[in-house]
Amino acid sequence: MIEVQGLTKRYGEKLAVSELSFTVRPGIVTGFLGPNGSGKSTTMRMIVGLDQPSEGSVLINGQRYRDFRAPLCEVGALLEARSVHTGRSAYNHLLALAQTHGIPRRRVSDVIELAGLAGVARKRAGGFSLGMGQRLGIAAALLGDPGTLILDEPVNGLDPEGIRWIRTLLQDLAAQGRTVLVSSHLMSEMALTAEHLVVIGQGRLIADMSVADFVAGASENVVHVRSPRAPELRDLLLSADVTIRADGVDVLEVSGLPSARIGDVAAAAGIPLHELTPRQASLEEAFMALTHDAVEYHGGSASTLPHQPGDGAAQAVGGAHLETHGAGARS
Amino acid sequence: MTTLTGVGPGRGELTAKAGYGVTQRRVLLSEWTKLRSLRSTLFSLLAAIVFVVALGILISWAQASHWDQASQIDRLTFDPTNTSLSGVFLAQLAIGVLGVLMFSGEYGTGMIRATITAVPHRLPVLWAKSIVFAVVTFVLMTVSSFVAFFGGQAMLSSKHIETTLGHSGVLTAVVGGGLYLTVVALLGVALGALVRSTAGGIAILFGVLLILPLIVNFLPSSWYDNIDPYLPSSAGQAVFAVVRDSSSMAPWTGFALFCGYAAVLLAAAAVVLRRRDA
Ligand SMILES: Nc1ncnc2c1ncn2[C@@H]1O[C@H](COP(=O)(O)OP(=O)(O)OP(=O)(O)O)[C@@H](O)[C@H]1O
Ligand SMILES: [Mg+2]
């Protein structure tokens, strides 16, 4: 269990992370998403005590990272930037880390085997490919057999086989009851790996919800309509809750209306339809919409995803926008 | 898939049972592993050994072969011990650079992040690096210093100008060669932790040890006499000089001051290491 409470980090003038609070539960993989520069890596560095928070705190299983007697046995971290001396072999790198804790050599050999590094363990880490470097980082994270894992973009640089390896590894680790926090830019990857999502933008929390809710929200009805009299139809469909994007002279992207209703309106007005297709927004598009709003509203105003009434797990955070959506459901 | 181990989550008490955990002794062992597993370190240490031994013998040989042409003053101020330890001046470059690299090498490659996540209290790392590198330097450089001394005296004996360990101050000076380099090593470690960059650390270290004495040399002589003996280089090098001019410090007084400079830098390094983001 990782509890992030009111975490804030300033680098001079730059506010990298702002009053961030969320909890990462054990037993599932939690995806940590956000666009470039949103503060994911900074948050992860603060979790393992590399950077000192300007405000707020992080507790792991109720303790500060610094207070652990055997930190590597509590938390395994794969950080964004490589954390290996280029002149040292993978084996000696892991051995030196293990020795700080009195972890036996046998365990070093085990994690080398596990990470698929057996063939190159005696070679200089400086000569490793990006993927090999990631594998070495993961071997280091697993060294102390920790109950909590924090991985910053672990699939970065891995080939498809490596990506699948990470995905199953993380799911297995979570299934063993461990707490797993993984950052990524790719919503589609997280949809396959994670069960829960924490989304941040500009250092602020945007959403803290289950992947299932996110996917349900993402498939909100966008209807693709093609008609030779598109502008006419557009005027008929427009109302407060409906947004319509014209795409070319004869195409409309309608959201906020079911396709049946659009068909009925067109038929009533005698407007011919050449195409009427309900379309699921891709996860990536939904993610972009979500984080784009955070940038646009500058105050962490909430997502445009509909609040799922009655679902306690769905908990979008932030501004007035969501309050109005959610108010009815809560009362 | 290889099993991760049978250990489940929430392992606080399990790790306690296995006895895993950070101790100063374990961090020392880890730093020893780091030191011996870098080829560049081994080469630099080898270079330092060669500098002390080969240069000491070479310069002693050169002195002996020019003895007949030497002036009266040169003969009166001739220091056979110090001459055979001339290589220490060159070896301090190799030792100083290595000392700086103990930390700057980790900051440069990112290794420091792995080190600090393993030892979040950080200070045990500073102490371990200092102790490991100081002990290695002291052992290797003191042995080299003795070899250079005996080799050098053998060269000087052709003109019967050699000395022996039995003479006053000579043993101190030979051990002093190793001690001086040990403190240079510690200055390097502290500077590496303070400035984090290899180039910056080396520039400051040799600026202070080599360039500062040259600058002070240009000052009016009344100033020079009051400043020069207290420079880190002069104070530290007093310990391996047997024949001294009147203004320089006594061997152990000078060395104590040199150690004081190193202690101040290490204390500053401790504060910075503890406070700054890694
Ligand atoms: N050491 C630092 N000094 C100054 N600014 C920093 C530092 N580290 C991060 N930042 C700034 O803080 C912000 C957040 O950076 P961070 O690396 O945490 O983002 P991220 O979400 O990991 O991005 P990415 O997806 O690109 O990895 C960025 O604007 C970055 O420029
Ligand atoms: Mg990042």
Image (cartoon, helix red, strand yellow):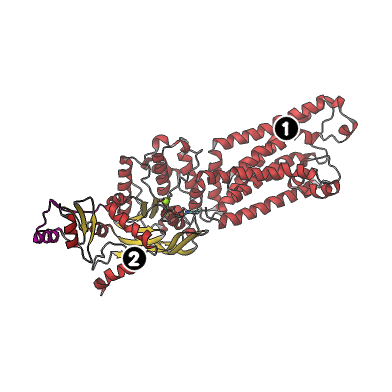
Residue A26 visible (yes or no): no
Quadrant occupied by the C terminus of chain A: bottom left
Instruction: Say which of marks 2 and 1 sits in front.
Output: 2
Q: Position of residue B72 (x, y in %)?
A: 90, 31
Q: Amino acid at mark 2?
A: Val
Is residue A281 rendered magenta in the image? yes
Vertical relation: A209 (above or below) A108: below
Camera-nearest residue between A157 and B7? A157
Q: Amino acid at mark 1?
A: Ala
Left or right? Give the position of A292 relative to A108: left
Q: Which residues are magenta?
A: A259-282
The numbered disc on residue A14 is none
Chain letter for mark 2 = A
Q: Report which residue position mark 2 lands on.
A: A317
Camera-nearest residue between A97 and B11? A97
Figure quadrant of residue A254: bottom left
Camera-nearest residue between A75 and B11? A75
Q: Please, what secondary structure does the residue beneath circle 2 have?
A: loop
Is residue B178 rendered magenta in the image? no
Residue B24 visible (yes or no): yes
Quadrant occupied by the N terminus of chain A: bottom left
Q: Position of residue A143 (x, y in %)?
A: 42, 48
Q: CA distance from mark 2 to mark 1?
A: 73 Å
Single out the residue that lies furthest toward the bottom.
A331
Q: Position of residue B188 (x, y in %)?
A: 64, 45
Q: Report which residue position mark 1 lands on.
A: B148
Q: Please, what secondary structure does the residue beneath circle 1 have?
A: helix
Dot 1 crowding, Cα within 10 Å, few <14, some 14–19, many 20+: many
Tell me: is circle 1 under 8 Å from ligand 1.
Answer: no
Q: Are marks 2 and 1 in contact (CB under 8 Å)?
A: no
Figure quadrant of residue A147: bottom left
Left or right? Give the position of A282 relative to B246: left
